[in-house]
Each structure stands twice: as C-alpha cells, then as structure tokens.
Image: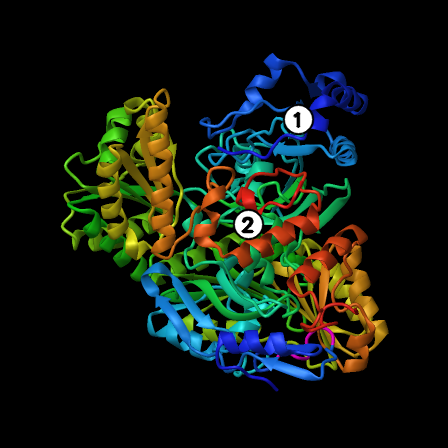
Amino acid sequence: MEQPLPKAEVLARRGEILAGLRGILPGEAVIGDAISLKPYETDGLTAYRQVPLAVVLPASEAEVIAVVKFCHLHGIRMIPRGAGTSLSGGALPLADAVVVGMMRMNEILEINYEDRYAVVQPGVTNIAITQAVEDEKFFYAPDPSSQLACMIGGNVSMNSGGAHCLKYGVTANNLLGLRLVTVEGEVLEIGGKHMDAAGYDWLGLITGSEGQLGIVTEVTVRILRSPEGQRAMLAGFASNEVAGACVDAIISSGIIPVALEFMDRPAIHACEAFAHAGYPLDAEAMLIIEVEGSEAEQADFLGRIEKICAGFAPISMVVSQSAEQSAAIWKGRKGAFGAIGRISPDYLCMDGTIPTSQLPAVLHRMKTMSEEYGLKVANIFHAGDGNLHPLIMFDANDPVSFHKAEAFGADILKLCVEVGGCLTGEHGVGIEKRDLMSAQFSVGELEQMRGIKSAFDPGWLLNPSKVFPLSEHAPG
Amino acid sequence: MIAPESEAGVCEAVRGANGPLLVQGNGTKAGMLRPVQAAETLSTARLSGITLYAPNELVMSAKAGTPLKEVEARLAEKGQQMIAEPPHIHGEEQTIGGIFATNFSGPRRVTGGAMRDHVLGVRAVNGNGEAQKFGGRVLKNVTGLDVAKFLTGSFGTLAVITEVTFKVLPKAEATGTIVIRNLEAEAAVRCMAAGLGSPFSVSGAAYLPAEKTVFLRIEEFAASVKYRTEKLAGQLAAFGGAEILDTAASLALWRDVRDCRPLPAGAATWRVTVAPSAAPKILAAAEMAGLAGILDWGGGLIWLSGEATEAAHQAVTGAARAHGGVWWLMNAPDPLRAAVDVVPAEAPALAKISARVRQMFDPRGIFNPGKMRAA
C-alpha cells in the first residue's frame, strides 16, 4: 500500500514534538516509546501496519483542542482513532502522524427519555449506549457487528450500519447533533437536540466523513423505545436465485422485516460447523428473517413470511418458537467472522452494495472469480438493503496469496459498481478502497469532494491518505 | 426563463450565465426564506420523468422537474409511498426536485426520517456547469462524502439538482389514530412523548392547541393497528379518554395535518424545530406575540402563523433560540423576509468553512444568491 512520504522535518523533530505534547497533556496521555506505540500500528484491517510518530489520549474536549492547535501550528498530521475496529483501515497511522485516541472521553453526559436522546462522548462504545437505557426499555438502533468494542465517535466518522438498518437506518439517520473540533482547534456545534437543520446539512456531511473534516468530541443520538419482542426464522433454498426471488417477494408483499440476512453455501457450512445453529447443510442459500411486535404480531408476521417462503420450495424452514431459539438462529450469523477464521488463517471482509435484483448474477460471477483466483469466498449479505459481505479466505504468510486476495476483492467491488451499486455500504473507504474510488466517481466528482475536505482542512493534516486516491491529494 | 429539457441543457445554461440565476422547479416555494435578486430564472421543470422504479428494491429515481403528484401516483400503483410524507402546502405543481432541495417533510418524519434520510443519490450541475453524480441507487452507501445529503435542503444555493434517487416504503394496510381531547400544551407534549416512547411504532404525533387535542397515528396491518391503538389508548388513560379513528378518517386527518390546514392563515408563517419538551414554552411565547400555532413531530416541529412584522419574527426566533431550537421563515411579504434572518446565522467558525464550501460548488456565486442568508 503506497503511502505519502513522511514529512522529514516532522520526523526530525520527534523528540521536540513529544516534549511539546507532554507540555499540553498529562504524561500518561502521551505515548512515545516503541513498545507502547505498537498496539496502535493497525486497526480492524490488520493487513496494513505503520507505527505512528506518537499517540495522544486526550480526556476532554479542551485537551483535544490543545493537541489539534499544537499539531496544526507545527504542520503535523493527525489520525483520529476510536476503538480501532475499522475494517477499511480508517485508523491506520502514518509514520509522521500523531494518533489522537478518543477512548478516554467515554462518559455518557445526559439521557433524556421524554425527548428521546442521549448525549455521549465519542469514546463511549456503541453497546454502552443501549446498556445505559435498556432498563427503561430503550435502545440505540445502529448495531455494527463490532458493537461491543466500537465507539460512537468512530460510528459517526464511518456512518456505521448493522444488521437492523433495514428498519432503523444507519448512524446518519439516528443522530441529532455533534461537536466537532476543526483542524484549527475551533469547535463547531452542529445540530442540537432538535430534528432537521435550518441551513446546510452539516450533520449529514460530517457523518461518514472518515475523520477528514474534524475530530468529533460529543454526539447526541436518538434513542428509541424497544419493541415488545422479536422473533426470527430461517429458510433454506435450493439456489441463490430462488432465495433472491424470495427476498423480492417478501419486500413486495409490504412486510419490511427488521432484519433480512442471506448466507450462501460456504457461509452456511462455516457458521454451522462453528455454532451448531441447526443450519440446513444441503441448502445453497439461507435467509434469516426477524420481525418485531407483540407475541400475536410476531406470529402473524412470521406466518405471512412463512407462506411466502413456502412458494419457493424451501429445503427447510424453522420458525423460532422462543427467544432461545431465535438466539440460536442468530448465533451462527453473528459468529460468522469467527467461523471463517476457523477454516482459513486469514480473510478479507469486503463490503460492497448492489441492487438486490443483481444478487444471483453477482454471486455467480463471484464463484467464477473464486475459481480463477484459486481463493475461497463465503458470502454474508444484508439482503434487504443490498449490502454484501464477501469473505475472501487467504494465507497472510504467503505474499502471493495476499496479493491475489486484494485483487479478488477489488474485482468484486468493481463488479458491485458495474451492476449499479457502490464500493462500500457500511465499512467506509479508508485506505482499503481509496484507489478504487475512481471506479465509482469521475475526476470532477472526486475534485468536488476533495474541495469540501480542503474547505475544512486546507493543509490536509486530518487523516490524510484515506478516502481519496493518492494521486488526487492536495499537497500536504 | 430558461427551462432546459436535458441535463446537458442545464450545463450549457449555467456556463452561459452572465449573472445570478433564480434556480427553481415550478417556483411554488419561491416564497420560502429570502427573495432572490436575479435577472434570469433557471427552471428544472422540463426535466421530467421517472427514470427508475424498482418496487422490490424500494427505490425510485426521477428527474428534478417530475411533479410530486406523478411520483406519488406511480408509487401508489404499487402500494408504496414517499416515507417522509412531503406536505402539499405549495399546491399540486411542486416538483420532486423542489421537495428535496428544501428537505421538506411531513408528519411521518418524527419516526420515519426526513427527505434527507431517504435520499440515495443526486445528479446536479455545479456552478462551473459540470454535471456530477453523488450517492447512487442502493440503500446503503458510505462511499466518499455524503454530498447527496448535503445538497438536500440546500435550496438550490450550491448546485442545480437535475435528478434524485430515493428510498420508498410500502403503504401500511391500515391506519389508526388515537384522539385525546382537553389537553393543555404541557400535558399534550407529555402525552405525545408517552406515545412516541411506547413500543407501538407511533408514526405521527400532532397537537392542535385551538382544539386542545392530541392525535397519535399507527400504521400497520389491520390486526396490529387494532391491537396497538387499543393498547396504547389504555396506557394513555391518565391523559383522558380516547377516541380511535378508522383508516378513512385517519387518512383524511393526517392529510390535513401534513398540509397544515388547521393552522390559521397569517401574513407570515414560520417553522420551528426544537426538543419536544420545549415546545409548550415556545408556543406560549408566540401566542403572547399574537401568533397562532400547531405542533407536529410530538412537539419537535412547531408551525406558527400571524402578522408579518419584525416584532413577530423576533418573538419566534427569540423563543426558538432560548430553547435550543432553529427556525425557517416559510412565507412572508418580501420586505420582511429580505430584512431578517430567515434561518439562524451560522457561528463564525462554521460561516468561514461554509463560505469556502459554497465558493467551491459555485465559484461565481450565481445560484440563488441571498436565498438563505443576506450575501
């Protein structure tokens, strides 16, 4: 992975910079020794590594401002980081950059049930928001797979999704406001506790901007009342085509399930071996469908869906009768990454989105590519919204295997764009898909986005070398 | 007026422009925010037609000048609808481009999201006359900056939207409404909060102060509507006995709420959004200034109408500001809307960035100058 040349004058002044940072933050909040820097060299995309110049762990917005002003003054690049769970390398350091880790800003500042919002600091984990409000039967809706670890600041930066966004939307649909520290160390108060922006939708622009525009120091999220209950079912089918047609039939019937997940044969087998969830091993494709409501409503909705599935000659169909059985159905899906990890030493988790009607054709093409590259691939798919997660299995100890996996992944994403989809549905561009951006956007369109980045960060100090193809970068 | 029939025509018109352009669809919302001083008008009204509709994928694309009524009729054929329930306040000539350019949402916004939440992609022409595409046609997309969302609600001040792609949803089989009367504003907002904080997926929550009446809507399969309205009415018994409206009565009622029919006509109209619990205080302050209002979005949206004076405007904006809310001057005679902040000013740190962003989209500053804020 090509990276911009480190600024020699910054590297040369490393000692001075560390001393400067220690003048701003308490000693333990500035990390400069090689061993302590090591854990920050990578994130959820472990294939790429780079030890940063330093790591700082501010504990307040005032400390963030002080660090940013210092770095801005000295022309030092900054990499904002939450829990480091990015699957696209969004938090990958540069050799001359200071990583600004937000995990110490982890307080929930306010919860308001009447107006249905919570104000939290960026280092609060996704699950902690739900845990803080679940006694009152509320929850925070976006639920990325990494929700035990990932932090809301990172969720905002990447506009994270999850398995339930078919009904509840992604991060951008569940925010009311945020505070953002600009590269100059000024605080922007965006939105508030009200709905809709009077003026430009800065909240929408900043959400998903991958740390390009500023550092998020506070987030106001919407919290929702939990449904009375939920229940899942699974159905196995003889082919991807039939399962895809069944998804279409469910959606066109007017039922929008809260989750609608699709797994192909390799994924079914890997997950079943791992979780013993009772998945149909003779099926080519399987759907997990979840509905919400009272006991009677669950039965009603699942009954309707069961009837639709029955029209597609399912190989098997299991309608959960209890919370335990629903959990068992989900167990395999939720453990999918671990399951793949058991059968392959390494895997790349891709994240394109396609129009759902293109699913059979895309899976077919992917099978051919898999044979051509000689690498196995398993597919997990948020079928309701077209978000595809091909898991490409490879061996990281073998450079040839890794490069093949990268090329295979790039081909899949280009295919997603070709059929009318996009490069990334929820993981972000990061470093991983940076060089593919020109497959989706014209030079002029990239230029327009770059211009927005430059309007916020004229010197390109914030998380540079991500999102935009390197050749498109403004000189740092 | 220039009204190109193609996107290429829009590019050409922008490149050829010698000065400011009034950018509009059919111009039905020209009265919103500030008057634009432009010798020439660039209309997207003749860029018309639905270019993609995939009901099974919950997605539609339409050229900017496509009438909203055409979009809604086409969706209705397949039992689907616009999720944000855009108001028809500006008549039946309004275009889909205008609805997105103003991010104008109706009652279902409270839990279903605004137009900006459903925009998937936008094609637009920037100030250099270049056609560009942001977002796409799939439901989940985080590729690059979300410029499609940023253009939604930008009132034609950054680029000329030529086509929009958006998410749609099925219409519910049935609609029910819980009606609770004799509530003062404070109790009404608490009642709506209890409804919106219930597990029954309330999709509309409005209060009419003149009638002292709260309306809570549920949209689902018929059996669910019956179950949920009855159960929720029971849970809200402390607020008073409830009447439950059937589907036909509910549809008529929410069409009226959507279009603000219960709001007394006034020379000026404002929209204020705020944390719902602050709505009664803003309503009271506005009433003191002689204005009338109604609440939607559980109190999160306040519509106000009354005299078109600076004093009235200051009463609205002062109350909104005091409670952390924001406002839009939706309609007023030109002298008033040219003289006041029709939306809140941007703080200096943001204004600096905002000017750079605007300069980058529209270097000559020719698109709807002064529409949002005095130049």
Residue A113 showing in the rendered view: yes
Q: Quadrant of the C terminus of chain B?
A: bottom right
Q: Which residue is mark 1?
A: A104
Q: Amino acid at mark 2?
A: Ala
Residue A112 showing in the rendered view: no
Which quarter of the figure has residue A61?
top right
Please give the name of the residue rendered at 34% of the width and 33% of the height, measured from the top-left corner: A405
Q: Amino acid at mark 1?
A: Arg
User: Is residue B125 rendered to the left or right of residue A97?
Assistant: left
Colour option used: rainbow
Question: Does the stretch in magenta take in A197?
Answer: no
Q: Quadrant of the N terminus of chain B?
A: bottom right
Magenta-colored span? B28-34
User: Is residue A265 rendered to the left or right of residue A169?
Assistant: left
Residue A311 x, y percent position in the rendering: 16, 55
Please give the name of the residue rendered at 71% of the width and 84% of the height, measured from the top-left corner: B39
Tag 1's secondary structure? loop
Marks 1/2: CA–CA distance: 24 Å
Tag 2's secondary structure? helix
Residue B47 x, y percent position in the rendering: 49, 78
Which quarter of the figure has residue B270?
bottom right
Q: A63 and B77: which one is in front?
A: A63
Crowding at dot 1, Cα within 10 Å, few <14 / some 14-19 / many 20+, comes out as some
Do marks 1 and 2 share a subunit? yes
Q: Main secondary structure of the magenta part?
A: loop
- Check the image and name the residue furthest to the bottom: B1
Residue A60 x, y percent position in the rendering: 73, 31
Q: Which residue is mark 2?
A: A172
- Check the image and name the residue furthest to the right: B311
Residue B109 x, y percent position in the rendering: 54, 61
Question: Does the stretch in magenta take in B29?
Answer: yes
The chain carrying label 2 is A
